Image (cartoon, rainbow, N blue to C red):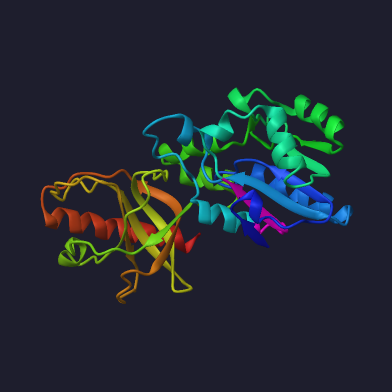
Amino acid sequence: MNAYYSLKQMKKFKLPVVVLGTFDGVHIGHRELIRTAVKRAAQLSGSCLVLTFDHIPREILKKNVYDVLLTSLAEKVRLIGALGVDAILVMKFNRQLARQAPGDFVRNVLVKGLGVKLLVVGENYRFGAGQAGGVEQLKALGRKFGFQVLIVPNRQVRGRKVSSTWIRELLQQGQIAAANKLLGRRFSVAGTVSKGRHFGTSIGFPTANLRLDRRMLLPSGVFAAMVTVAGRRYRAVVNIGLRPSIRETRKERLVEAFIFGFHKMIYKQALVIEMVRRIRAERFFADKKQLAAQIARDADRARQILRRA
């Protein structure tokens, strides 16, 4: 699988079946859509191409947007690539693209750029300036330019459409297990371990600290989690938040992982944290002794949860 980051980079593919979407989170609905395209490409002896974007529209169209992304761009590309597609085109989503009329986007990108033979989209897909284009317009444009359009019904859970918006709601409410079911995997964050103030070490719980892009959605609280570092997986208890018990002048969201039975120095190494279940909300503790006692209880609770995970 190859990933391309501009239309000019793209090589020509045989009988392109193109699946189109933002795909933030690569949840079970997205996976069903992409797997449908992969299957149809195989039936046609063609190629499955995914067209997605480097930003979600609200990042560009609204100012000061943060706490919205379910997946980083790198993670989105990795998850899509694992579904058996032949190539991914990540287009830059900017105001110029957002203002492009539906017909211009189809002609310039899908037809001239990719040579689409079959386009696969979800039933509520919208595109073009002001999201003026919908599936009926796609079908009309397909007839005009000589490609077919396959509309895939929405994936439903408990009578509700699976969506990135629903998953964001669940994560912000701390309902990690419910969000994980819609994702079809554990919600995860990835980053590089940074140096902290060694506060955790001072109370007997050394942590690996990650400071992440503020656009990433981070549910606050204390969580039972699995951590992958240097290719190995470990159990952990993780705190996400502003650390109210520690007096700091700079307030930013921090991810701190106390990894069970782990004693190596891993500064500047990549870390992936998979959330299994929320244990409690972040709280203020008046002194180190109270905080250490609570972390010990959290760690015991995390171990119990992870034994069954």
Residue 159: name its quadrant: top right
In front: 47, or 228? 47
Q: Is residue 171 above or below residue 41?
A: above
Residue at x 16% of width, y 64% of height: 203
Q: Position of residue 241 (x, y in %)?
A: 29, 46
Q: Is residue 266 above or below residue 110?
A: below
Residue at x 18% of width, y 47% of height: 250
Label tally = 0
Q: Position of residue 99 (x, y in %)?
A: 58, 28
Q: Is residue 141 above or below residue 258?
A: above
Residue at x 36% of width, y 45% of height: 214
Q: Position of residue 278 (x, y in %)?
A: 40, 48
- Whether residue 251 is visible, yes or no, is yes
In front: 57, or 212? 57
Q: In the image, which residues are magenta? A: 81-91
Residue 112: name its quadrant: top right
- Residue 89 among those drawn in magenta: yes
Left or right, 31 with respect to 234, comes to: right
Left or right, 250 with respect to 56, comes to: left
In front: 128, or 65? 128
Residue 251: name its quadrant: top left
Q: Position of residue 166 (x, y in %)?
A: 53, 34
- Residue 76 among those drawn in magenta: no
Residue sitting farthest toward the bottom: 264
- Whether residue 36 is visible, yes or no, is no
If the image is split into quadrants, where does the N terminus sit? Answer: bottom right
